[in-house]
């Protein structure tokens, strides 16, 4: 029952919804939606009756109700890996700020696993929340392969891709950044340049390894590759310790700053100096890298700009833009005190 003998609406045992309000006010649920969305074509008497019913039922319009008439939720969805490194975290913050500036909110779904069921469940949750567009911040090759096999019918962008969604991809140019780092060491005079790669299955790791190999080949220098790390300083330290005995390198290009920190620790612990004995270059320019001992030469990725471009691209698609502009965010080499000419 929705109305008392006195004509007042009776609250249901559960939270009131838009149809409860419609029954109590004696109107259609479409009319309630028009009241919620401030539609100008309603009679004032009807508007007041609906508002009285909403007050009596303690009804609070949710975002889903607001979309009934406009079909616009003003929500952007973001699918992110559970392990959020510095870069994606910085991009995510920029996405939220740019979305808010455009009048949108952001709904985030975290991926704890990269299997088909987990990714599908996360996407389904975002769709249930009526997101208008989607940003995919899941740079593992396996995640992207699953996503590419799904039929996503709303506007979306991926930060990196494995190929099929190149017209939906935005990225910092990883290959160019790796070539910058490697070229810097070669220009200093190093010819025994070791690369510490990130873990297999990550798009950035593969691109940085490719860039290193291409630059070494361009200089006709033999590449030297260490066992891969897992992005952590601990893995850099562990790999560094394993390589110091019988050292056959004078410089290291690490695939990220954290592993570079571990390498420096291992070198200094073994009695070597950086850059006196070994030069080290990182990748990412994390906030801490300027305060390593010595301050780290690294490749800066403009993660906030990448996040802003994601939002701009989605808003363009929602406005009818045909495709993404095909231009990556350019990386920048930041030279500090961890690199110098080779000894002797």
Image (spheres, grey):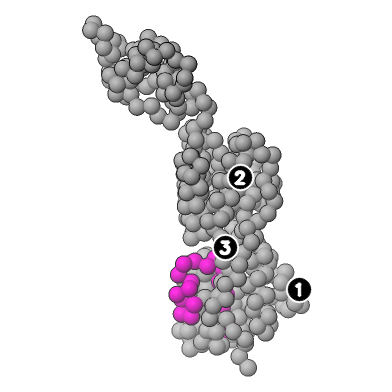
Residue 241 located left or right of residue 3:
right
Q: Can you tell which of label 1 and label 2 is closer to the viewer? A: 2
Q: Position of residue 6 (x, y in %)?
A: 23, 7
Within 10 Å of disc 1 (Cα), the crowding (few <14, some 14-19, many 20+) is: few
Q: Is residue 194 visible?
A: yes
Checking the image for residue 245, the label placed there is none
Using the numbered discs, state the Cα–Cα distance from disc 1 to disc 3 in whole angstroms. Answer: 24 Å
The kind of secondary structure element at disc 1 is helix
Using the numbered discs, state the Cα–Cα distance from disc 3 to disc 2 in whole angstroms. Answer: 19 Å
Determine the residue positioned at 46% across, 40% down: 105
The kind of secondary structure element at disc 3 is loop
- Assess whether mark 2 and mark 3 are in contact (beta carbons under 8 angstroms): no
- Assess whether mark 2 and mark 1 are in contact (beta carbons under 8 angstroms): no
Q: Quadrant of the C terminus?
A: bottom right
Q: Is residue 265 visible?
A: no
Q: Position of residue 100 (x, y in %)?
A: 47, 44
Q: Position of residue 79 (x, y in %)?
A: 52, 45
Determine the residue positioned at 45% across, 84% down: 269
Q: Which residue is mark 2?
A: 313
Q: Which residue is mark 3?
A: 301
Residue 173 located left or right of residue 46:
right
Choose the circle earlier in sequence order: 1 or 3: 1
Q: Give the residues drawn in magenta, as a range.
A: 278-295
Q: Is residue 286 magenta?
A: yes
Within 10 Å of disc 2 (Cα), the crowding (few <14, some 14-19, many 20+) is: many
Residue 218 located left or right of residue 267:
right
Q: Is residue 215 magenta?
A: no
Using the numbered discs, state the Cα–Cα distance from disc 1 to disc 2 in whole angstroms. Answer: 35 Å
Q: Position of residue 72 (x, y in %)?
A: 52, 30
């Amino acid at each position: 029952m929705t109305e008392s003998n006195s004509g007042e609406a009776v609250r249901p045992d559960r939270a009131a919804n838009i149809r409860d309000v419609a029954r109590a006010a004696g109107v259609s649920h479409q009319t309630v939606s028009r009241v919620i969305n401030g539609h100008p074509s309603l009679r004032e008497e009807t508007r007041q009756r609906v508002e009285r019913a909403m007050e009596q039922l303690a009804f609070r319009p949710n975002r889903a109700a607001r979309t009934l008439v406009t079909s616009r939720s003003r929500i952007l969805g973001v699918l992110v890996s559970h392990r959020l490194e510095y870069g994606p975290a910085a991009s995510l913050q920029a996405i939220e700020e740019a979305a808010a500036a455009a009048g949108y909110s952001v709904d985030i779904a975290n991926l704890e696993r990269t299997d088909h069921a987990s990714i599908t469940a996360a996407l389904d949750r975002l769709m249930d929340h009526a997101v208008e567009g989607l940003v995919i911040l899941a740079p593992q090759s396996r995640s992207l392969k699953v996503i590419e096999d799904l039929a996503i019918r709303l506007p979306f962008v991926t930060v990196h891709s494995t190929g099929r969604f190149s017209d939906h991809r935005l990225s910092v140019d990883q290959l160019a950044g790796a070539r910058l780092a490697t070229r810097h060491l070669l220009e200093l005079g190093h010819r025994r340049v070791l690369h510490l790669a990130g873990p297999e299955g990550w798009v950035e790791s593969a691109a940085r390894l490719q860039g290193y190999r291409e630059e070494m080949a361009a200089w006709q220098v033999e590449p030297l590759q260490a066992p891969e790390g897992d992005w952590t300083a601990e893995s850099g330290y562990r790999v560094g310790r394993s390589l110091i005995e019988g050292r056959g390198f004078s410089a290291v290009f690490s695939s990220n700053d954290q592993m570079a920190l571990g390498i420096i620790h291992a070198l200094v612990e073994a009695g070597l100096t950086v850059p006196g004995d070994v030069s080290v270059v990182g990748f990412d320019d994390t906030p801490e890298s300027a305060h390593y001992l010595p301050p780290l030469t690294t490749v800066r990725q403009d993660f906030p700009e990448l996040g802003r471009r994601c939002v701009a691209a989605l808003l363009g698609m929602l406005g009818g833009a045909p495709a993404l502009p095909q231009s990556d965010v350019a990386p920048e080499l930041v030279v500090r005190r961890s690199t110098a000419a080779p000894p002797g």
